[in-house]
Image: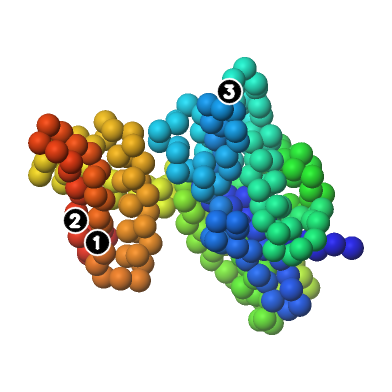
Amino acid sequence: MGKVIGIDLGTTNSCVAVKEGDHITVITNAEGSRTTPSVVAFTKDKDRLVGQLAKRQAIVNPERTISSIKRKMGSDYRIDIDGVSQSPQQISAMILQKLRRDAEEYLGEKVGQAVITVPAYFTDAQRQATKDAGKIAGLEVLRIINEPTAAALAYGMDKGGENKILVFDLGGGTFDVSVLDVGIEDGVIEVLATSGDNLLGGDDWDQKIVDLMVSEFQKNEGIDLSRDRMALQRLREAAEKAKIELSTLSETSISLPFITADSSGPKHLEMSLTRARFE
């Protein structure tokens, strides 16, 4: 029997892992990252982009870029591009296919089975839609597991006895908090309570940094970068990079040469951002 992969199909980012012996390996994708943006795009030439390639062109190609499709799972929502109507399950399947290919490339063998995590609050319809997406992607979904339950399993694998665990899941687009009762001895994990905010996540932190850069640049140069899609794409990428760097550094520099131009010539954005100001 082939390997079974574990998939976190997220609102903003997704990842895939596999058990190797007693160790869990999060698989690096073709772009060299352990997470894959949950973004699908269609170019004007009708090519399909998934992951980082789709995310990079999202602002300059908004009408043909689909993100946060997880929020539509289990609904009748449809996406129409080039006269083709597609369901959330079909779009999610494209993300799952990308994760599957990355796993197969890493393992050097075909992958046909998976376990996929979903939020604890997902309805039966949303869970079934997730299974359907897996089937479309060519995966037999062995089990759908609640995201906080998966986190508790990982936390409690080397701990005995019973524990009550509070799981904070701050993702790119959502924030979930769950309280679980973990009985390692009998293998029972019960979700006691769950709450959160479906419209709060790391993307909001990125946007705050983008807003700051736009404001500072307009104050210094008199140009509103929020009206320039190409500039906005670069700002968004720089904001995410700065946010990540401020997790370990007290200060970071943002440098975007040739961000725009006016009659006097090209303009460059240079600024420093401290963790204190960001917080």
Kind of residue sitting beneath label 1: Ser
Q: Residue at x 49, y 54 (%)?
A: 171
Instruction: From this view, report whether residue 234 is shown above or below residue 5.
Output: above
Q: What label sits on residue 81 in the rendered view?
A: 3
Between the C-alphas of marks 1 and 2, the distance is: 6 Å
- The answer to which of marks 1 and 2 sits earlier in the sequence is 1
Q: Is residue 145 visible?
A: no
Judge from the rendering whether residue 11 lies leftward or rightward of residue 259; answer left or right: right
Q: Is residue 29 visible?
A: yes
Q: Nearer the viewer, residue 180 or 216?
A: 216
Task: List the residue tagged with mark 2.
Answer: 271
Between the C-alphas of marks 3 and 1, the distance is: 39 Å
Q: Quadrant of the N terminus?
A: bottom right
Q: Residue at x 50, y 61 (%)?
A: 168
Q: Residue at x 38, y 62 (%)?
A: 244
Please report contact status of discs 1 and 2: CB closer than 8 Å, yes or no.
yes
Kind of residue sitting beneath label 3: Ile
Q: Residue at x 24, y 61 (%)?
A: 253
Q: What label sits on residue 253 in the rendered view?
A: 1
